[in-house]
Amino acid sequence: MAMTSFAADAADERDRGGPQQPLLTVTDLRKYFPIRGGVLGRTVAHVRAVDGVSFTVRKGETLGIVGESGCGKSTVARLLMRLVDPDAGEQVFDGEAVGEQGGISVAQMRRQVQMVFQDSASSLNPRMPVQNSIAFGPVAFGARRADAVAMARELLTKVGLNPVLFGGRYPHELSGGQKQRINIARALALKPRMIILDEAVSALDKSVEAQVLNLLQALKRELNLTYVFISHDLGVVRWISDRVMVMYLGEVVEIGPADAIYTGPKHPYTRALLASRPALDPDQRREEAPVSGDPPNPVNPPSGCRFHTRCPHAEPVCSARAPSLGDATGFGHLAACHMQDAGSGHTAASVLQ
Amino acid sequence: MSTAISDTTPPALAELAGPAQRGYWGTVGYRLRYDPVTLFFITILVLVILAAIFSPWLAPNDPYQESIIRRLKPPGYRGHILGTDELGRDMLSRLLYGGRITLTMGILPVLVATLIGGGLGVIAGFAGGFVNALIMRIMDVFYAFPSVLLAVAISGAMGGGAVNGMIALTLVFIPPLCRVAETATTQVRNLDFVDAARATGAPVRLVLWHHVLGNVLGPVLIYASSLISVGIILASGLSFLGLGVKPPEPDWGLMLNALRQAIYVSPLAAAMPGIAILITSVSMNMASDGLRAAMDVRS
Amino acid sequence: MFSYILRRLLAAIPIALGVSMVCFALVYLAPGDPIQTLLPPDADAETVDRLKRLYGLDRPLPIQYLSWLARVAVGDFGRSIATGRPVAEEIRRSLGNTVLLASVSVLIAFSIAFVMGTIAGRRAGSWIDRIVTGIAVLGVSLPNYWLGIVLVIIFAVELMALPASGMAGERFDPTSWEHLQFLVLPVFTLSMIPVGIIARTTRSAVSEVMNQEFIVTLRANGLPEWRVLRHALKNALPPVLAVMGLQFGTLMGGSILVETVFAWPGSGYLLSKAILTRDIPVLQGTILVLALIFVATNLIVDLFQSTLDPRIRRG
């Protein structure tokens, strides 16, 4: 079978800085959405969807992003693809600034970074046979139609769908899992180096989810891919991720290696999230809810540490000053909590350290 | 590679995938074939249109030939299959010729308005922001008139006539078509597959052409087809008021008006042009409903 | 809520201004010199001059529009070419008759269509649903001026049971059959389209509500069918009432054809006569008033709906 075109090259000619250079570095990403209101429809406030997010993705790793719904993780995904324009922040892809003088253009970045969306149904054009949806990207970049369709059919095989049976079908003729496989095939069509998976398996049944996750892992090894995996499902994120980033109300509260985060969470929010998972052992299940209430309104986030309104360890310093994460672009285990900072003035700070 | 299926799929399997290999319009046609009601009305519609096109060959008499002694004769009178009108002209011939004018006046404005209104709507929907506000607020003004009133106002002020009537009808149909196109475009624009297409880095015009337009075209065409029946009724209404076609042209609305005076003598003749309008507009509405159902691939 | 009402009212102002601009432009759409379209053909040079100065026809268009708007705002629509009477007076005389015709038609259409739509919606897909849907399609496909002619043929010409056209006297008396009988045929004719539209709306609203879970729950709880239906209708009513309100506005402006058929002395008939005599001042004034009524009806329906359904206020 003619699979050579998709085999991972020993050395990708697009690789510029070598394995040590991060594939993606994001610094201080910000996006405020205006809220219009009043009689004249003026901007009266902003939703701080993403408020100063920084992180790094290494070549070949999977970075998981977790958080409650509304914490800004999906906005991060759209900002990374530039489907939404950021208000501030720098994005460096393999050593080159995206959309800046001397860097690479957004279009060039998009050829190397692709995305899989949560809603497998609405992310496929209902009026297009799925193989044409897959072939669209290559055709748009000048591939001959016949070549692009042939490649699309090859990709269908790769994601486990028989092209003879599925190539000419329309999205409504497919199941959710099949549609998501098509979406993965489409993301692969431009031979990207990185794929952003925004809740890509969240809408699927558990058994189908497992199959698609296995497929993603297999593709990653075979094609040398890097993933940013966004989900609210902590179990899935642990399984697939090398490192994990926890977000709360548009900010990063903790980031670090997956094992370290799951076995020794540093931030009270992360601990609460982990505790909120239903334990498999019924005797281990807790009675009281680990985090009470809904997250505060991102229009008017709490002062200081945004988690202090729900944090069991909150002290005056928490509402007075925002804790810092430290060097978020590094690869260590970091948490934005005053209890982690010896000089913060929090009574628990010295004890923990 | 464990998930890959062998390339040597048996031919039978390839056939299984048969119906799915049809294109979008192929699927629509396939569905229409199994909808006898819609097929029936489409057939009538085609017959009406053919009769209008070939009226010079089909009409037994000259539709303008008057006769003082043969006025308002009943159907079957001396070779006049449907009788004669108030000036002794052959009714059947006038109805056949009248179809040409009435259908043209009903259909042409919808076509032009689909191009203009649909185009403006797609632009407004895709551009958003200021462009959208500018286009849609202007449309709102024209939308603020009941359609009959707007058609009467414009053609009344311009002084009637077939061309002015068609201009008026075009202006009446642009705003609703623009709204439908704008709504459809805005909806499609916010779906993930348009984002996915943009995420490939493809130029905007390709995204617009392949992913937006195809999904907007359906609703716009269905809506336009439902407007044709309104167009025919409005066009003959204008002629009925003396604003459309001028005598002695055979237009269904105008015939209705002229024969109204003869109600007491020949009520059947007075009803006939209306029956022609009714048949055409019911067929048009039913065909349009059937098309709407067939074009909804997702159902 | 208050802010929503205020916002809707503010949004209606530019629309009303736009409508007035379109009506103002009508005079310029007319072929020939605007002054000739505004005056009888035999007007003497002095009158022409006086009117030219009064209307400021020698000044730039925006100024002309503003001075026209100022006169319209105080109810001065000019004089009718045909009768010489002020246009405002002509409109005032006829408007009441059209309101009468349109409101009775809409009420009757509502009572017929609501029953039809409820029956069809409760049994969506059944033969009775098909019949009702068929009647609804017929209602909107029927040229209503033709239906009027047919009704005249049947009831006035053949059966001689009802008057063919006109109205009994200047003042309408709803207690006298003498007066009421003139209303029967025009009302029936005019209600055809709203019957079709309201029946369709009711059908889809009822069938949608009937499939909702709370209705299924009511049924499962063993509530008698007529009480289940009452719950369903209460939920289906708001959109139907909204459509009914919109139809009133449409009929007010769209009754010109039916009024012409029955020579009903309303604003539509006035308009129809103005077209025949090329009486542009009457045409302009009537269309402006009818369009503004349409805008106002839409606004009222909108506000009414928002008080019933708070979801509409968002967005």
Image (tube, rainbow, N blue to C red):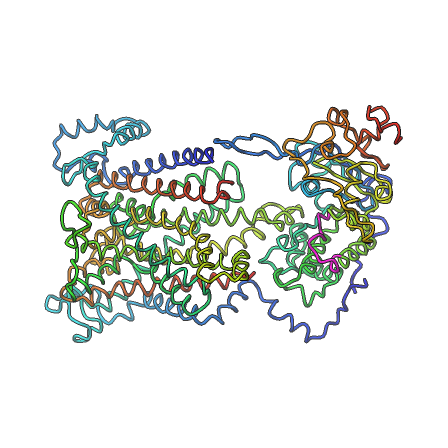
**How far across and down, in percent of the image, does residue B50 sit?**
35, 68
Using residue A280 as the reference point, say whether residue B251 is left or right of it. left
**Number of marks in the image?**
0
Q: Is residue C63 above or below residue C229?
A: above
The image quadrant that residue B271 belongs to is: bottom left
Residue C279 in view here: yes
Q: Which residue: 79% across, 60% down?
A: A3
Residue ID at (43%, 48%): B116
Q: Nearer the viewer, residue A154 or A5?
A: A154
Q: Where residue A139 appears, x then y in whole percent? A: 65, 53
Observer-nearest of B183 and A209: A209
Image quadrant holding the N terminus of chain A, namely bottom right
Quarter of the image for residue A7 reads: bottom right
Q: Quadrant of the C terminus of chain A?
A: top right
The image quadrant of residue C217 is: bottom right
Whether A137 is drawn above or below A327: the answer is below
Magenta segment includes C196? no
Q: Nearer the viewer, residue B62 or C260?
A: C260
Residue A128 located left or right of residue C44 = right
Q: Which residues are magenta?
A: A196-209
Task: Return the residue nearer the eye: C73 or A12.
Answer: C73
Please state the horizontal and vertical placement of residue A116, each as a whole percent of the image: 70, 50
- Going by the image, does A22 lie left or right of B232? right
Identity of the residue furthest to the left in this view: B69
Q: Position of residue C33 (x, y in %)?
A: 23, 36
Q: Residue at x 73, y 48 (%)?
A: A197
Query: Is residue A108 among what the camera can see?
Result: no
